[in-house]
Image (tube, rainbow, N blue to C red):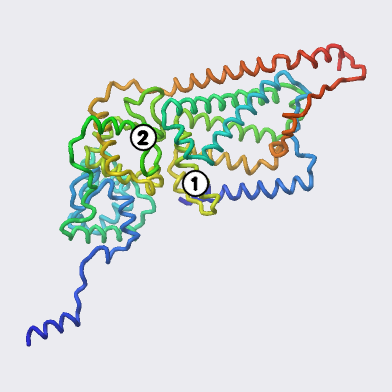
Amino acid sequence: MINDLLLYGALPYAATVVFLIVTIQRYRQRSFTYSSLSSQFLENQHHFWGSVPFHYGLLVVLAGHLLALLLPRAVLWWNAEPLRLYALEITGLAFALLALVGLVNIVVRRASVPKARVVTTTGDWVLNVLLGTQILSGIGVAIVHGWGSSWFSSSVSPWLWSLARLDPEVAWVAPLPWLVKVHIVNAWLLIGVFPFTRLVHVLVVPNPYLWRKTQVVLWNRPRTRSS
Amino acid sequence: MLRAVSILFLLAFPVPAVRPAQTVSEETTVYYERNCQSCHTIGGGRLAGPDLKGVSERRDRDWLLRFVVDPKGMIDGGDAYAQQLLADARGVYMPAVPGMSKELAGKLLDLIEAESKLEKSRFAGTQVSERPLTPRDIERGRDLFVGRVALTGGAPACLACHTTSSAAGLGGGRLGPDLTDVYARLEGRKALGAWLSSPPSPTMQPIFREQRLEGEEVLALIAYLKDEAEHAREREGVSPVLFLVSSAGFCALVLIAFDFAWRNRYRAVRRPLLHRG
């Protein structure tokens, strides 16, 4: 019971406070560190199969979680027809697998490409472990304890809303299976470490890139084969 | 004269009425409703657990307190009566009740004792209609289970967390147990009705506390689950492998789409530039 209170009643607030304070403090004092610190220029073939599946996979999965949080009734309505439920669940797992493919490529590339390895910090490896835990536990939950889109809406959303009301009702999540708990606790750890890592680039995504005019970059100095 | 003295005596020493609602706190009653009544009646016969009417006459209070606080410990500790209870429940342990303490157990025993003295306790059992179950009930129960017909209280459909042998396609959810034989496991209509009216499992409790099933919905679900138990086909087991394979296939298609969408990624501008460089 004490553990439940700590993990589902206290940890979320601790993670959120750290997230808010450090995010703001870092932006005020070291705003130029708000970057993904991309290593695409160092190697871009393997990078493509890491970065692209990882980002598209995570974006879709996160959108699904957000939808179940903000519109739980709508998700339950959609899932009332089993075929629609299956379509939603297959889509969710497919994009989670996509994120996993991306993360595996990211890790392999960071470990095997010398130029990429040089610019990889201990913090990056910690982040990769947390992201790996999150994606693998999420996939595990989807397979072992499906249909999460329905039970997230009815069991996890009310808990998250109780956190938002500053009246945490841990009884919603305390009886859930351990794999689900790993996924939940690890999510809060990720939120807690967010401002210390390159994840901060999420907050400064250059959205105008989506609609600005194409820019072609040309080199105008002689380059040698060896470079 | 004697009559007048008697009246005066009665007025001077009013005899308190034995009304459980007045002696037992509302909090204890609510706790009992949420945690005990789905498995026990008081004077209504056995459900998943024994009828609790007069339980304090069967065992002494200290024993009952110890059992309510830690049923599994008592059974595993070798207590003969506790093991008899386990055998009567066909090997199903009484679950540890959330938030249970010796003090709370004492209050619950007071409630049971007071209710046992009444001719008919309000906890004599859930009033699920005794009318015969029809094929229409089975159909409605199936629709409620799957979610095609929404539960009036707003609770999610059973399929979100449970499956049955007849759940088509990729089957039902896997958060809770398979309910194909739940009708037989709970030994029939009465206990299943009690369970559905006030689900006691810690996962279901918070959901159904405010979103209770209506009597007709309980009846329809009983009809469907009874039909499931009676006609349970040889379960092929809806394996999650099909789900995983479908998702992996979709994932592969998306990867192919990425490769196609960005097929000129290196070729159009940058690669010729690099070669020229």
**Label 2, label 1: how many angstroms apart (C-alpha)?**
26 Å
Q: Is residue A147 left or right of residue B18?
A: right
* Residue A45 x %, y %: 72, 18
- Which residue lies most toward the bottom here? B1
Name the kind of residue labelled 2 in the image.
Answer: Val
Nearest to the observer: residue B220 or residue B267: B220
Residue B21 image point, x, y percent: 27, 63
**Looking at the image, is A26 positioned above or below residue A95?**
below
Q: Helix, strand or loop at disc 2?
A: loop
- To which quarter of the image does residue A54 belong? top right
Image mark for residue A159: 1
Question: Which residue lies at the image location 33% right of the left edge and 43% below the top edge?
Answer: B213
Q: Chain of mark 2?
A: B
Residue B149 tag number:
2
Residue drawn at x 45%, y 46% as measured from the top left: A172
A20 lies left or right of B147: right
- Direction left: furthest residue: B2
Q: Quadrant of the C terminus of chain A?
A: top right
Between A205 and A33, the residue placed more toward the observer is: A205
Relative to the observer, which residue lies in front, B202 or B272? Answer: B272
Asked if B47 appears above or below A142 in the picture, the reply is below
Q: Amino acid at mark 1?
A: Trp
Label 1 sits on a secondary structure element that is: helix
Identify which residue, B73 or B252, lies in the foreground.
Answer: B252
Q: x, y percentage for residue B73?
A: 32, 47
Outermost residue to the right: A221
The chain to which mark 1 is attached is A
Nearest to the eye among marks 2 and 1: give it: 2
Contact check, label 2 and label 1, Cβ < 8 Å: no
Dot 2 surroundings within 10 Å: few (below 14), some, or many (20 or more)?
A: some
- Residue at x 55% of width, y 33% of height: A64
Q: Residue at x 69, y 24 (%)?
A: A111
